[in-house]
Every structure is written in C-alpha cells, then in structure tokens.
Amino acid sequence: MTNARLALLAASAWLISGLLSAQAVKQAPPPTPTPTTPSEALPQTLLEEDELANAGRAYTYDPAGRRDPFRSLLVRSENRAGGARPPGIAGIAVDDVIIQGIWKTKAGYLAQIRGTDNKSYLLKPGDLLYDGEVTRIGPNEVSFRQNLNDPQSVKPFRDVTKQLNATIKQ
C-alpha cells in the first residue's frame, strides 16, 4: 500500500469513530428503574451520592449504625469521658474500690467496700460496678472483672483481685 492510501484509511477510520461516538452521545441513556424495596434503594442512593461527590458537590458520611472510621479508637467514648457517674455501686470504678471487710453469711460472702463518696456499700458476686462486675468473693479477697476500653488489648477485660489485708508499700 502506498502512503496516500494509508493516510486515507486512517482518516476514514477517525471520521467513522467520531460519528459513532457523536451518535452515542445524542442517544439518551435509558431511565433507571426505581427500586421498590429498601434493600434495593440503598445501593442506588449510594451511587447517587458518589456521583454527586465526583461532580464536586459536598459529600456527607452516613454511618448507618457503624462506628466513624475517622475517629480515634484511643479516645474514650463520650458517655464515660468524665460525665457524672450514677450514684451508689453503679458509679464506683474497680480501681476506686477500697475493701473494708468481708462478711460470711448463710448465702455466701459479702464484701464491705468504701466508695469514692466515703460511704460504705455491701457487694455480692454479680454486682455491676461502673467499669466491671464482682466475680467472686472469698474469705480474704474479692475478684473483679474490669472492662477495658483499649483497642490494642487482646481481651476486652482484665481480672483484678483485691485483698482485704493489703498493706501499702512505700
């Protein structure tokens, strides 16, 4: 083939491709069917929001019950971040418990503790504290299961045992 024929063939191919793409632009896309159930509506809504975001409009994040991926896991949640604790045993943290005595009853052992409000309370196994619960009370010790808010911890809790006659070392 000669160079003139190759140039003519390339020009005609370019012209045909331009005409085909112009016809494709002129044809309107078929209307999208409206979803009838909520499970079908969610993907359509997400696609519409994605198109708006790509067009340069504002984008909003809808967590839909999931945690916000842009919030730090190391920050304590708002409900535990220093707000007012509930009164009584439910407001005492495991670390704040000071054991004053252990009582033996027919039903088992009870622990007498002093709270942060300088009042005495009686604990029995199963009582819920601010950040844990009482798991076992023995003749000279009380065991707690403390809930941890540490995402790097393997277990979401730790077991804490406090002795009745613990001496403070200085």
Image (cartoon, rainbow, N blue to C red):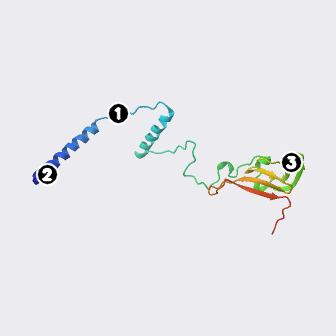
Position of the C terminus by quadrant: bottom right
Numbered badge on residue 108: 3
Q: Amino acid at mark 2?
A: Leu
- Of the two numbered discs 2 and 3 in the rendering, the one whose residue sits closer to the viewer: 3
The answer to whether 5 appears left or right of 128 in the picture is left
Q: Residue furthest top?
A: 36
Q: Nearer the viewer, residue 149 or 56?
A: 149
Is residue 113 visible from the viewing direction of this image? Answer: yes
Q: Which mark is residue 30?
A: 1
Q: Position of residue 99 (x, y in %)?
A: 84, 56
Residue 66 lies left or right of residue 90; in this view the side is left
Residue 96 position, x and y percent, is 78, 56
Q: Describe the element under mark 1 as helix, strand or loop.
A: loop
Secondary-structure class at tag 3 = strand
Q: Is residue 85 above or below residue 33?
A: below
Q: Choose the circle earlier in sequence order: 3 or 1.
A: 1
- Please tell me the numbered disc located at residue 47: none
Marks 1 and 2 sit apart, C-alpha to C-alpha, by 39 Å
| Marks 3,1: beta carbons within 8 A | no
Q: Amino acid at mark 3?
A: Gly
* Residue occupied by mark 2: 6
| 6 and 44: which is toward the camera | 6
